[in-house]
Image (tube, rainbow, N blue to C red):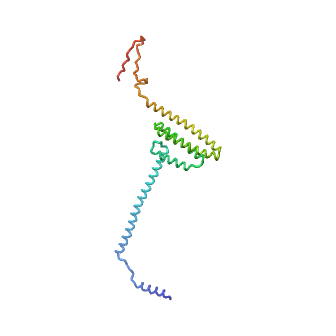
Amino acid sequence: MTPEVERLERLAERLRAVEPYVPPPGAKIRGWNLVLAAVEQSNRARSRVHPIRRLVLASAAAAVLLVAGAVGVSADSLPDSIFYPLKGVLENTRGALTFGVSDQLAFHLDLARTRMAEAQAMFARHRVDLADQALRALDDQLNDAALVIQAEKQTDPAVGAAMVNRLSQAIATHDAQIKQARDRAAQALQTADKPATSNGNGNGSPAASPNGNGQGNGATNSPHPTPKR
């Protein structure tokens, strides 16, 4: 038998001679109280985490809905709207994601039509300053379309020639629409500047009543007084 085994046997003999320890009832109660306190503290911490998590999720959902609503409103906004700058941001993002020469040309022509519609709406509201701003933006889009066509003509002249026809048609349409919008705005301003008249004959003088006696003697008769109502 090795010395290590003999040492373990002597230790076992001593442990068998020691009476087992029985904790007092107070110690058991204190132990259970510590366990219950730890469980209750864990539950309170978990209950605090859930409302915070729900609040974060609700805030995120509200932000998403707010942004989606603003994006939807800005898509149809006009230059006099507070959402119009957001419309420009979305258009720039769309342009950055547009690839291919044909798609780029369609993108610029579509924005040119949008600027034309905005200019017409501003002319109708007598906001000539914002209408001119929209027309300048329209010219920028047509110039960008021309640059796209110029680059494509160096690569494929046939495709470039077809694109030139599309651009020419768009310019002709926009020119006619611009003239029509300006004419309508000028007519509206002229109508608004006309002085008001007292009756429908346009000269502001009272109309003479007819003779009414049927004799045709050429005598001058005073107009009939208008009865009071």
Viewer-side residue, 46 vs 138: 138
* Figure check: 145 above or below 183: below
Left or right: 173 with respect to 62?
right
- Residue at image position (54%, 41%) is 139
* Figure check: 27 above or below 116: below
Query: Residue 113 location in percent, x, y?
Result: 54, 41
Q: Is residue 73 visible?
A: no
Query: Residue 109 location in percent, x, y?
Result: 56, 43
Q: Is residue 197 visible?
A: yes
Left or right: 84 with respect to 145?
left
- Residue at image position (41%, 20%) is 207
Query: Residue 46 location in percent, x, y?
Result: 41, 62
Splitting the image into 4 quarters, where does residue 153 fall? top right
Query: Residue 54 location in percent, x, y?
Result: 43, 57
Query: What count of labels does the image hold?
Result: 0
Viewer-side residue, 226 vs 112: 112
Viewer-side residue, 118 vs 132: 132
Which part of the image, by quadrant, shows the C terminus?
top left
- Residue at image position (41%, 17%) is 210
